[in-house]
Amino acid sequence: MATTIKVDIVSDTICPWCFIGKRRLEKAITSYQVSHPDTKFDIKWHPFELDPTLSKTPANKLERYAAKFGAAKVDGLVEHMKRMGKGDGINFSYGGPIANTIDSHRLIEWASKQGKQDEVIEQLFKLYFEDEGNIGDLDQLADVAGKIGLDKVEALEYLKTDKGTREIKDAILQSQMEGISGVPNFTIDSKYTLSGAQQPETFLEVFEEVGKRLAKA
């Protein structure tokens, strides 16, 4: 019997663990579907701001990290994340700028309405974490839209307005009101919550539990 498992993910586009979490979730889904080929997954990403104080004007990423974590810790943190990323096929690079992420979330919502949610999130993560791009630059965000087959000019026109901004901020507030203070946060089948970039095996355990319950419904 065909079943659908719903997964809601709260995430920010400058969150390295969110990128890792995406990869691990994908591995778990692929593994689960080997033994449950009729199961589909309905995945919805929701916005979050790790640092609401960030401006649209880009800042140096490493300098911002030094101010937040302490200069003495930054090198170790960066090397740790690079090692962790490689284990999941991600080539973290910590050069480049950091900026406010609201516009990137607006792009996600815009692309999602055109059936390109996963593709846009994947490219935004690559832009920021692997290509040292500016997550707050509207032209670079529009380029992402073009890479996934959407109209780059239309995307840029949309981003130059404030459309969707209130909805994004309301969604962030809603997550905070639900007690979410860190990301990634995964809610599976509207019942099981996992915080952080869990290993694929952890996701699989939940999928098995949900699958059994849905089969009895």
Image (cartoon, helix red, strand yellow):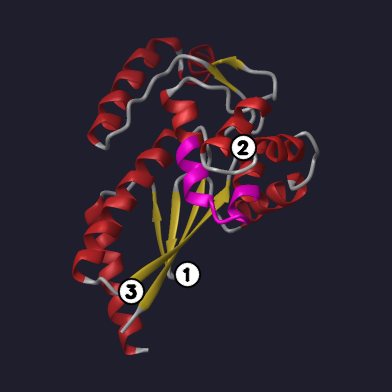
Question: How many angstroms separate mark 2 from mark 3 (CA)?
Answer: 32 Å
Question: How many angstroms separate mark 1 from mark 3 (CA)?
Answer: 10 Å
Please tell me in which quadrant of the rendered image residue 31 appears. bottom left
> Could you say where residue 190 lies in the image, as x and y percent from the top left?
47, 69
Say left or right for 1 vs 129.
left
Asked which secondary structure carries label 1, the reply is: loop
Q: In percent of the image, x 39 and y 20: which residue is there?
A: 93
Q: Does 14 lie within the magenta span? A: no
Query: Which numbered tag is attached to residue 210?
Result: 3
Sequence-wise first label, 1 or 2: 2
Read off the residue under disc 1.
190
Total marks in image: 3
Query: Which numbered tag is attached to residue 104?
Result: 2
Question: How many angstroms separate mark 1 from mark 2 (CA)?
Answer: 25 Å
Q: In the picture, which quadrant includes the N terminus?
A: bottom left
Residue density around tag 1, few if under 14, some if 14–19, many if 20 or more, within 10 Å: few
Relative height, residue 1 to residue 54 (above, below): below
The answer to whether the residue labelled 2 contacts the one labelled 3, judged by CB atoms less than 8 Å apart, is no
The answer to whether the residue labelled 1 contacts the one labelled 2, judged by CB atoms less than 8 Å apart, is no
Relative height, residue 214 to residue 86 (above, below): below
Residue density around tag 2, few if under 14, some if 14–19, many if 20 or more, within 10 Å: many
Please tell me in which quadrant of the rendered image residue 16 appears. top left
- Amino acid carrying label 2: it is Ser
What is the span of residues highlighted in magenta in the rendered image?
Answer: 110-123
Q: Main secondary structure of the magenta part?
A: helix
Query: Which numbered tag is attached to residue 71?
Result: none
Q: In percent of the image, x 56 and y 52: which residue is there?
A: 46
- Amino acid carrying label 3: it is Val
